[in-house]
Image (spheres, grey):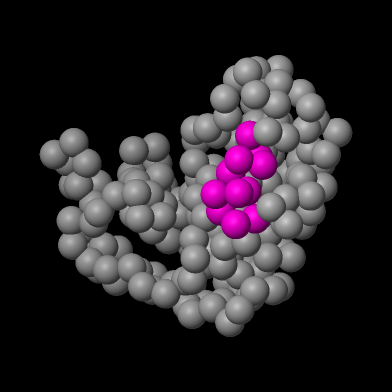
Amino acid sequence: MAVVEALVIDNLACRRGGRLLFDAVSAHVAPGGALLLTGPNGAGKSSLLRLLAGLLQPETGTVTGGGRRAFAGHDVALKPRNTLGTELDYWARLDGGQQRLPGALAAMNLTALVDVPCRHLSSGQKRRAALARVIAAGADCWLLDEPTAGLDTASSALLVAAMAAHRAAGGLVVAAVHGDIGLADAASLRLG
């Protein structure tokens, strides 16, 4: 990973469905850092992640730096009839991560499941697949929306290890959370 600039969120406001979710939101995430987005349901945590991913436009404010970003939201985007390996290979080719895919599969304990049709995967396995996609992308900044949803204790530990390795290499993590995800030294931004 190349040297990454800090992610700078400056005075962001977000309006969805005619409703102002948040305004005047600012934060700074240095290389190797992490930011936890907290707050009640509907406060705009997922919307803020989507703004950072470039999937939404802010009402006001700017987002700069942070390098290339990869987003894992609630929708896992796996075609039910395809195998897990086929689906993750497709995304890895799009993201330029084919060489990183075997390591990403191993990091999320999915190697033994590559021949399984996605319709047969549990919700936790699908969540791990979304996380493997982010890892394989090789992005500088991981944007994770409730990344431990559906994960058991062992899978959560895999995520903690992956985030620690990513941050140790200078990567950034921004995650919307409702509880502890193993990033005790992360900064926190409460919405709502």
* Residue at image location 24% in from the left, 47% down from the top: 21
Using residue 35 as the reference point, say whether residue 102 is left or right of it. right
**Residue 144 x %, y %:** 53, 50
Q: Name the image quarter holding residue 130.
A: top right
Q: Name the image quarter holding residue 123.
A: top right
**Residue 64 sits above or below residue 88 on the image:** below
**Residue 73 sits above or below residue 80 on the image:** below
Which residues are the magenta region?
87-97
Q: Main secondary structure of the magenta part?
A: helix
**Residue 67 x %, y %:** 48, 71
**Residue 186 x %, y %:** 58, 66
Please say whether residue 157 is visible from this viewpoint. no
Check the image and name the residue furthest to the left.
18
Check the image and name the residue furthest to the right.
112
As rendered, which of 105 and 152 lies closer to the eye? 105
Say if the magenta span includes residue 3. Answer: no
**Residue 166 x %, y %:** 68, 65
* Residue at image location 69% in from the left, 74% down from the top: 169
**Residue 52 sits above or below residue 179 on the image:** below
Using residue 20 as the reference point, say whether residue 96 is left or right of it. right
* Residue at image location 64% in from the left, 74% down from the top: 1
As rendered, which of 109 and 91 lies closer to the eye? 91
* Residue at image location 63% in from the left, 18% down from the top: 81
As rendered, which of 140 and 146 lies closer to the eye? 140
Please say whether residue 112 is visible from this viewpoint. yes
